[in-house]
Image (tube, rainbow, N blue to C red):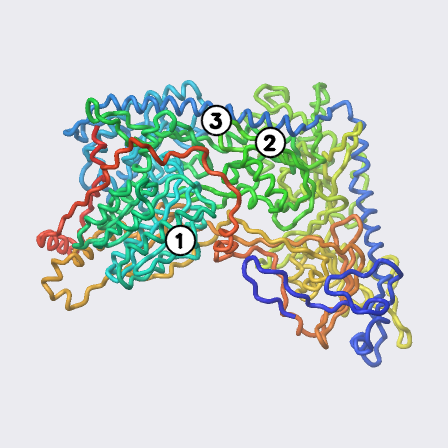
């Protein structure tokens, strides 16, 4: 039976088998039911109808073989269990290693992890770290306000009057088409020397600040020059801050004019394409410049909207969405005579990355038709904002309307919904070149505490879609000190290469007055920010005392992780924050939902839960016990959690005070000892400050040995805990070699290697030559076999990893091994812990042969095979009848470990559905396996080829021949708009066609962020042996499956398929790309996850002056200008435009 086609998040496939008849009378149980435990199992063949016996009969003249009976296969399973257990007892050395630890009891102490004390200490340390940054922020914000207040505006200021370091100057000099090179910059740009600083991962100059000005802002404008003039005084405050706190990283002032001044100075990381960086669009600036927003965007799609104007509107909406953060809520609708949402979202939704992507894609599908109906658009928007039955920001409420113009003022709508309190601000945008009267649009904005903007061309989009933040900042400025509260951001990628950071932000207000007795200024000057690298916060958390599976994590009010071992974005786009929800970082369940809610609410708590965890290689899922403990981090929006397995409650702390013993054990780290004692890999940890890191473990060990010859394990520059534990484990694992491994013949039992790995960071592989084929991570805490062994009882098999797309294993050229490992559990004075993992590496080919013997009628390998005569009746076995009988060992993830089929040996390590899809589906449908599906929101995918490969953007108006011959057309707004489009298109081409990340040179456009669906399988509820029939009509197959005790293996015996009629069903395990970005967003927004917004909201102040609400400026084109532009275009000499800085008149202070 074929598995039905599925999308991401599909349901379980239906049954594809028919269970055997049950003993006694009555109806047969449904799919997945288990055999009753009472009573002996009846012989399999007696249960089969006569017709089903036919395929089992031998051909005429051949020996008569039947499918093995259940007790026979159970006997084979016991032999397999005994063989595995025997080998591990002899070579694993679990018991011997326990004795070694007890014999060396005087060399270590057993310490306890007390979760509540641990998590409170770490939270306090993080609070102290962030508080130091807060003090520096406050000094900067106060100084900036005072400097600007004392500054005298200069109308006649010139570029040569200002001396500063232009961070983009070097890149512009290297670019012959640079704006400054073309027109010759008059600014006095400093030339600085830089030194490499590992803290900044960059070259810096600590004596100066650097200035970055967006590409679309003219550096020589009066506004910018005055801004550069007064912000220069911040340099000394930056330097003094660093003197008081040398750990400070980037200190930044982002101005509302677009100027960024940061310290220390470093050259700008210029992208390979257009630099679209504007500090006002950074997540940290947006969060610091205004309170959360509930925004409804309505777009006029009436027939009067021409192709170019509609394209401008679409781009404007996308740019507007980029000004929103995860604290905001939004919806987008189009309107003509009626209003309707552009996407599947029927109400306000959180403005997170995935929801904004849905909007951006939906906006591209808008089509212009019908007549303009402002009333329909505004009524829809007000209804959206009045819906109190949904989660929303409940702070600033606003409507953003994009239109080409109209005469209706819809005063009756405002009277009904918004007056007299005017709780909703209305912002209107006149888009495109047209001759409509803009007075109604201005009136709408002014009458509703908003602002009116004009977007005549592409060059005006970015500036005018972000200027509304100045209006929203008015209540904050008027609130004064009450609004001066530091906020901490989500995690995001630093634009200067620092990696993942969080930023503390503080708004900077304009304290000037326009004259004596006048009202105070209500403009925000900008936002001050100080970065904190996530790595600096991680250093405050315990590294190695929590064990391989213990960890610390932190989340914010949105439930997004600040710290988590699974926070590993494959690609980062500095335009967007890194937002990984706690429930996506782990496998979601009800217990974790409760923990997340409690943490967001700022509560303390502790809970022990049984939950599912993914293996490090994301191939397996284990059901485990975990203890969660959490506390809030005071003075922040973060909450800290600690996760500990029960076996990590205690840990070992070495106490090697005997220096002679230190030297003795240290000698076993020297490569000269490897031949007799086995090869040693040491975990690449930060043992000492001066230790040079290396990805090559041999080189790292060499660096470590060289350093240890200069310092002692008790040196102050070293981590004494790590060093003492490493040296102790070196000695303990050497004693294992001496007591167990050295005198054993590995070849007798077909072993390629034996090994031991420890919490202290030692992995010892014996014999030394086996290290050449050792591919496991030298850091045990990052090795999948190590972590899974700690979480599972018994022996954990790990076949070599094989991808279905890669070539099979080459057994002839390489010796392939299968790892078998188990944890060493110690009980010392009633305290239980697991400080090590031991194991063996099986020779695949030799053990495949041994597997066939153990699952046969022979008692040992030298015994001759039993022959079945013409008149005798024999049961098939896995050796003699391997042409008819399939026998396999599959691990708990569904991967092939061993097979009696020689042609399948090169498929060991593959998901079994790729080997025998029919049989794997039957195992799944009989509940031997359970499936767990989840989504990886941090994946990277190859870029998709663009859908539009034409030279011009879709939707742009293309004139006809008749238009070109008509003189009136050349003086029309349409012609002017077209020429302006062509002109800007030559410079800002990527805005219409390229992805913003690509335009900014992010990852060189090789990969982009995407969502991958992950599927893992793990053992289901069936523990006993089980017989069943795979019902394929005339091609039915018998099979038997049984778990092997004390292992993660499933033993399966099945008839080989006689035909391929049942090959339609196939389970998938490999990651698959979800084109819809994971679970259906339209469904997810109907059940939003719990979150809380910022504790404060500034959206109203009775003293706010709303008279500054925007004024339009009309500039009809002259025929001379049009002719000049045409000639320049024809000659191929496009002039580089100098976009004017849009600034409120009141910025001049």
Q: In which quarter of the image is the N terminus?
A: bottom right
Looking at the picture, does residue 180 appear above or below residue 1041? above
Position in image of residue 686 (x %, y %):
57, 29
Q: Position of residue 1070 (x, y in %)?
A: 59, 56
Quarter-of-image position of residue 237: top left
Q: Residues within 10 Å of mark 2 (few under 14, many from 20)?
A: some
Label ID, residue 359: 1
Residues tagged 2 and 1 counted as in contact (Cβ below 8 A): no
- Res 531 quadrant in image: top left
Q: Which of marks 2 and 1 is nearer the N terminus?
A: 1
Q: Is residue 699 left or right of residue 102?
A: left
In the drawing, does residue 1100 fall left or right of residue 603? left
- Depth order, front residue of 192/553: 553
Residue at (56, 38) in percent of width and height: 564
The quadrant holding residue 239 is top left
Secondary structure of residue under mark 1: helix
Residue 1055 visible: no
User: Quick check: 1118 left or right of 1057?
Assistant: left
Q: Which of 139 and 842 is in front in this view?
A: 139
Separation of disc 2 and disc 3 at Cα? 20 Å
Whether the residues at callouts 3 and 1 have beta carbons within 8 Å, the answer is no
Q: Identify the mark at residue 604; answer none if there is no mark.
A: 2
Q: First in sequence, mark 2 or 3: give its number.
A: 3
Q: Where is residue 623 in the image (x, y as percent from the top left)?
A: 69, 46
Q: Residues within 10 Å of mark 1 (few under 14, many from 20)?
A: many
Kind of element beneath mark 3: helix
What is the number of the mark on residue 130? Answer: 3
């Amino acid at each position: 039976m074929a598995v039905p086609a599925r999308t991401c998040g599909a349901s379980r496939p239906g049954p594809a088998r028919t269970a055997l008849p049950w003993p006694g009378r009555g109806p047969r149980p449904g799919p997945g039911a288990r055999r009753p435990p009472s009573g002996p199992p009846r012989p399999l063949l007696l249960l089969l109808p006569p017709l089903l016996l036919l395929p089992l009969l031998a051909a005429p003249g051949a020996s008569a073989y039947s499918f093995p009976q259940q007790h026979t296969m159970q006997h084979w399973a016991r032999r397999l269990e005994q063989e595995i257990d025997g080998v591990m007892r002899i070579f694993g050395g679990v018991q011997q290693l326990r004795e070694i630890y007890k014999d060396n009891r005087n060399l270590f102490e057993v310490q306890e992890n007390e979760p509540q004390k641990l998590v409170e200490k770490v939270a306090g340390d993080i609070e102290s770290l962030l508080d130091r940054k807060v003090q520096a922020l406050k000094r900067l914000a106060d100084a900036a306000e005072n400097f600007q207040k004392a500054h005298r505006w200069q109308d006649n200021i010139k570029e040569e009057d200002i001396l500063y370091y232009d961070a983009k100057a070097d890149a512009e000099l290297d670019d012959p088409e640079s704006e400054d090179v073309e027109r010759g910059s008059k600014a006095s740009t400093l030339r600085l020397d830089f030194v490499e600083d590992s803290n900044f991962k960059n070259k810096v100059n600590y004596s100066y600040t650097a200035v970055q000005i967006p590409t679309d802002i003219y550096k020589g404008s009066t506004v910018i020059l005055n801004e550069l003039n007064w912000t220069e005084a911040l340099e000394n405050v930056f330097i003094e801050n660093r003197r008081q706190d040398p750990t400070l990283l980037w200190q930044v002032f982002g101005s509302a004019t677009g100027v960024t001044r940061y310290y220390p100075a470093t050259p700008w990381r210029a992208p390979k394409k257009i630099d679209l960086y504007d500090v006002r669009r950074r997540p940290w600036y947006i969060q610091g410049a205004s309170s959360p927003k509930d925004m409804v965007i309505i777009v006029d799609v009436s027939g009067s909207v021409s192709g170019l104007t509609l394209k401008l509107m679409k781009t404007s909406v996308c740019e507007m969405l980029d000004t929103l953060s995860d604290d905001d809520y939004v919806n987008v609708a189009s309107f003509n005579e009626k209003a309707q949402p552009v996407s599947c979202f029927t109400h306000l939704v959180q403005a997170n990355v995935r929801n904004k992507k849905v909007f951006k894609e939906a906006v591209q599908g808008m089509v212009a038709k019908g007549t303009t109906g402002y009333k329909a658009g505004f009524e829809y928007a007000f209804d959206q904002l009045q819906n109190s039955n949904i989660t929303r920001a409940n702070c600033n409420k606003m409507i953003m309307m994009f239109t080409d113009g109209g005469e209706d003022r819809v005063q009756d709508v405002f009277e009904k919904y918004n007056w007299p309190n005017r709780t909703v601000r209305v912002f209107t945008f006149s888009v495109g070149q047209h001759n409509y009267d803009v007075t109604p649009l201005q009136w709408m904005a002014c009458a509703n505490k908003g602002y009116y903007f004009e977007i005549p061309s592409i060059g005006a989009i970015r500036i005018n879609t972000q200027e509304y933040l100045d209006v929203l900042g008015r209540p904050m400025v008027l609130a004064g000190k009450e609004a001066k509260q530091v906020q901490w951001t989500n995690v995001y990628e630093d634009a200067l290469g620092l990696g993942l950071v969080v930023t503390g932000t503080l708004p900077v207000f304009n304290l000037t007055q326009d004259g004596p007795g006048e009202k105070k200024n209500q403009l925000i000057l900008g936002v001050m920010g100080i970065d904190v690298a996530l790595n600096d916060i991680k250093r405050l958390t315990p590294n190695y005392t929590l064990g391989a599976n213990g960890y610390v994590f932190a989340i914010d009010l949105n439930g997004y992780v600040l710290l988590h071992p699974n926070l590993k974005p494959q690609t980062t786009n500095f335009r967007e924050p890194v937002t990984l929800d706690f429930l996506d970082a782990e496998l979601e369940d009800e217990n974790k939902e409760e923990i997340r809610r409690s943490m967001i609410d700022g509560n303390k708590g502790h809970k022990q839960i049984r939950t599912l965890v993914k293996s490090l290689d994301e191939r397996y899922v284990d059901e485990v016990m975990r203890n969660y403990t959490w506390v809030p981090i005071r003075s922040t929006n973060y909450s800290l959690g600690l996760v500990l397995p029960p076996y990590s409650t205690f840990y070992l702390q070495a106490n090697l005070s005997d220096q002679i013993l230190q030297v003795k054990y240290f000698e076993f780290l020297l490569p000269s000892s490897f031949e007799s004692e086995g090869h040693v890999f040491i975990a690449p940890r930060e043992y000492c400050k001066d230790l040079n890191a290396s990805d090559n473990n041999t080189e790292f060990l060499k660096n470590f040995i060289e350093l240890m010859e200069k310092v002692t394990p008790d040196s102050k520059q070293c981590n004494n805990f790590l060093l003492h534990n490493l040296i102790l484990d070196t000695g303990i694992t050497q004693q294992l070699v001496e007591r167990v491994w050295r005198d054993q013949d590995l070849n007798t039992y077909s072993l390629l290697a034996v090994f031991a790995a420890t919490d202290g960071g030692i992995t010892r592989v014996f014999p030394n030559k086996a290290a050449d084929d050792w591919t496991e991570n030298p850091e045990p805490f990052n090795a999948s076999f190590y972590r899974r062994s700690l979480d599972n009882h018994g022996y954990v098999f790990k076949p070599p990893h094989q991808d279905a797309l890669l070539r099979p294993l080459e057994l002839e050229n390489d010796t392939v091994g299968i790892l078998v490992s188990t944890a060493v559990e110690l009980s010392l004075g009633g305290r239980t812990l697991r400080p090590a993992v031991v194991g063996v590496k099986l020779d695949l080919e030799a053990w495949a042969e041994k597997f066939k013997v153990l699952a046969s009628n022979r008692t040992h390998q030298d015994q001759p095979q039993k022959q079945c005569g013409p008149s005798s009746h024999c049961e098939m076995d896995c050796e003699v009848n391997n042409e008819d009988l399939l026998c396999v060992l599959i691990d708990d993830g569904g991967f092939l470990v061993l097979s009696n089929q020689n042609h399948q040996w090169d498929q060991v390590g593959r998901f079994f559905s790729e080997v025998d899809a029919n049989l794997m589906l039957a195992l799944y449908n009989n509940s031997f396996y359970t499936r767990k599906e989840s989504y990886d929101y941090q994946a990277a995918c190859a870029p998709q080829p663009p859908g539009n490969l034409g030279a011009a953007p879709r939707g742009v108006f293309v004139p006809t021949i008749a238009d070109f011959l008509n003189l009136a057309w050349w003086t029309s707004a349409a012609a002017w708009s077209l020429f302006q489009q062509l002109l800007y298109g030559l410079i800002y081409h990527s805005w219409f066609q390229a992805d913003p990340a690509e335009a900014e040179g992010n990852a060189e456009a090789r990969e982009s962020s995407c969502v991958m669906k992950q599927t893992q399988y793990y053992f289901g509820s069936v523990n006993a042996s089980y017989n069943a029939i795979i019902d394929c009509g005339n091609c039915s197959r018998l099979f038997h499956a049984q778990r092997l005790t004390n292992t993660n293996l499933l033993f399966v015996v099945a008839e080989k398929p006689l035909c391929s009629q049942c090959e339609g069903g196939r389970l998938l395990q490999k990651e698959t790309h979800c084109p819809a970005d994971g679970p259906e967003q339209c469904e997810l927004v109907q059940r939003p996850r719990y979150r809380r917004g910022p504790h404060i909201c500034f959206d109203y102040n009775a003293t706010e002056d709303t008279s500054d609400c925007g004024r339009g400026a009309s500039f009809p084109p002259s025929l001379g200008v049009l002719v000049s532009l045409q000639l320049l275009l024809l000659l191929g000499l496009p002039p580089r435009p100098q976009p004017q800085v849009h600034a409120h008149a009141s910025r001049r202070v």
